[in-house]
Amino acid sequence: MLPYRQNTVQVRYRIIEGEGALRLKLLPSMNFRRHDEPVGTPLGKPFSINSFEGRYEFRQMKDMPSLRTFMHGARSAFTIEERVIPEIVYGQEECRGYECLGDLWSPGYFRVDIEKGRDATLVASTEDWEVLLALNPDEAFAAEKERKERLISVAPIDAHEGRGAELVLAADQFIISPVGRTEEVYRLGQGYDDKP
């Protein structure tokens, strides 16, 4: 899930069928580069890893934002085991004829135990910790579901279900707040605030 107007992702892991617990290991891999730089941009070094009360922050020593991560779940932990993963193939770039090979840096791996009825959620963000941890995953999911339901409810009646509702939600994904603009978009597509 991508919470509205945040540079955050929440990835939830859930056992749908079967019994017993599983230990899940997740290997975050990254390259700190600008969005318009090619995927083959060399890994900048050095990297730093900071941790505090289950919060893990990864940073490259330059003018880039930190990646902040938190694992919600039973017996979660992070093991530092740095390595470079060479020549990852980026399929979309390859299909478009762009440079498609790039290296990634991994700081180590998360581990968490999951079983039926006990999910695990990895949250990764460039937002401040207060934003990232303001809601637990269930609360964040419920808030996003409610926001989307409200968005559909104010759309024309023909867009309350089916393809119309899908188009309303698709259009919502294009509402952004570009850096440098003074106007703000009202929530739920109600219009623009003409105050600076």
Image (spheres, rainbow, N blue to C red):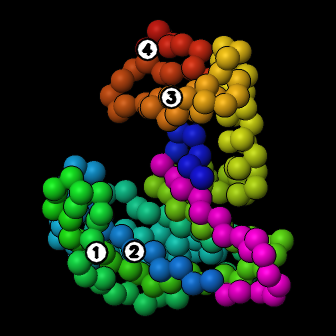
Mark 2 vs mark 3, CA separation in Å? 31 Å
Amino acid type at image mark 2: Ser
Q: Circle 4 — which element? A: loop
* In the image, residue 146 lies in the stretch drawn in magenta: no
Circle nearer the N terminus (4, 1): 1
Residue wearing tag 4: 196
**What's the mark number on residue 116?**
none
Q: Residue at x 50, y 28 (%)?
A: 171
Q: Which residues are magenta?
A: 7-23
Q: Assess whether mark 4 and mark 2 are in contact (beta carbons under 8 angstroms).
A: no
Residue wearing tag 3: 171
Residue 185 seen anywhere in this rendered image of the structure: yes
Q: Circle 2 — which element? A: loop
Residue 81 percent location from the top left of the image: 43, 90
Residue 141 percent location from the top left of the image: 71, 50
Residue 44 seen anywhere in this rendered image of the structure: no
Mark 2 vs mark 1, CA separation in Å? 10 Å
